[in-house]
Amino acid sequence: TRAGQIRHFLDLDRFDTETLRRILDLGAAYKRGDHPFGTHKPLSGRMLAMIFEKPSTRTRVSFETGVKQLGGDAVVLSKGDTQLGRGETIPDTARVLSRYVDAIMIRTDDPRKLAELSEYATVPVINGLTDRTHPCQVMADIMTFEEHRGRLDGKVVAWVGDGNNVAASWIQAAAHFGCAIRLACPPELTPDSGVVAWARERGASVEIGTDPAAAVAGAHLVITDTWVSMGCADGNRHHLLSPYQVNEALMAKADPSALFMHCLPAHRNEEVTDAVMDGPQSVVWDEAENRLHVQKGILSWCLL
Ligand code: CP
Ligand code: NVA
């Protein structure tokens, strides 16, 4: 099969660091208005299919806008509108979509669905979030940090709250980009142990505790995310997570240069206060904007 040569964008642990750096550089070039492939419509005639089994604002709009800005087009498939919703298998869907389109992005719950799609597709598959990881988001986060503060190497990143999919991709990023990561999570909501083991084997510093103040002390970047991710049963999560709110008192413990990030959507005055979201350390709007530029880097790497 051609599987070995297809440039899937599945997870950060599947890449060498130079390739991730190349994708970030492409994204930065597009943001500057450069044409790194020598033409302003390098994806002319190319079609991206996007399968959404969960809601999205940023991922959908940034991929659709990005592919169109590069001369391509996109078709959006929502779970309820496709035969996937009536039980057509992922392998059969992968085989059929591969006959029509040039790349497939999927947002789904079970990471095994992403793996299966990439196994049977004969075009690149892009991970638009699963319950396990969210690599496109973290690429945009890295771009945003480095625009404001320079290289991540040697920096300390604090993750506060649910040890979720975005946290997992950040842990993988730490192994590539030389930052230490300290997570403060309730013991019930610690990050994926396989991801943590992988990053530590690669030499990353990954500390996991339960004290937000300890995680944030001296950190150069403070990140949080919703307390109730898509598909989570709400249960007693608010009760578990209320000590993990990022507020001005917590931010004051970070390095004075620290930035605040949140992948959005935010639940204001739950995981983060208005004062922090709208405050001088917050770069959440740049972070959201950079989804667009990074998607163009990812699409270009996959297809050009
Ligand atoms: N951050 C993010 O992926 O946002 P959406 O769910 O709106 O795509
Ligand atoms: N952790 C969140 C991220 C949303 C972009 C979720 O999975 O819902």
Image (cartoon, helix red, strand yellow):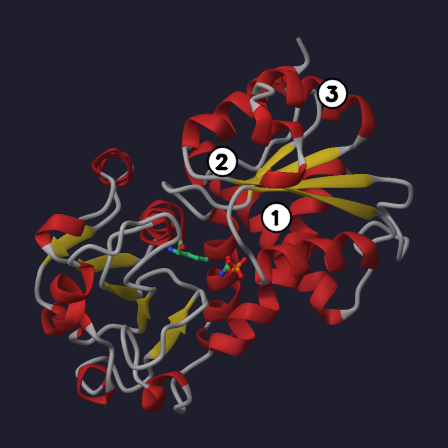
For mark 1, what is the residue?
Answer: 22
Instruction: Label 1, secondary structure: give it.
Output: helix
103 shown above or below 251: above
| Kind of residue indicated by mark 3 | Val
| Kind of residue indicated by mark 1 | Arg
Say which residue appears at 32% left-offset and 68% top-offset.
Answer: 223
For mark 3, what is the residue?
Answer: 96
Say which residue appears at 90% left-offset and 53% top-offset.
Answer: 39
Give whichever of 20, 9 is nearer the camera: 9
Q: Give the Cα separation between the discs numbered 2 and 3.
A: 27 Å
Instruction: Label 3, secondary structure: give it.
Output: helix
| Kind of residue indicated by mark 2 | Phe
For mark 2, what is the residue?
Answer: 15
13 shown above or below 155: above
Q: Where residue 13 appears, x then y in whole percent?
A: 41, 36
- Pointer 2 with pointer 3, Cβ within 8 A: no
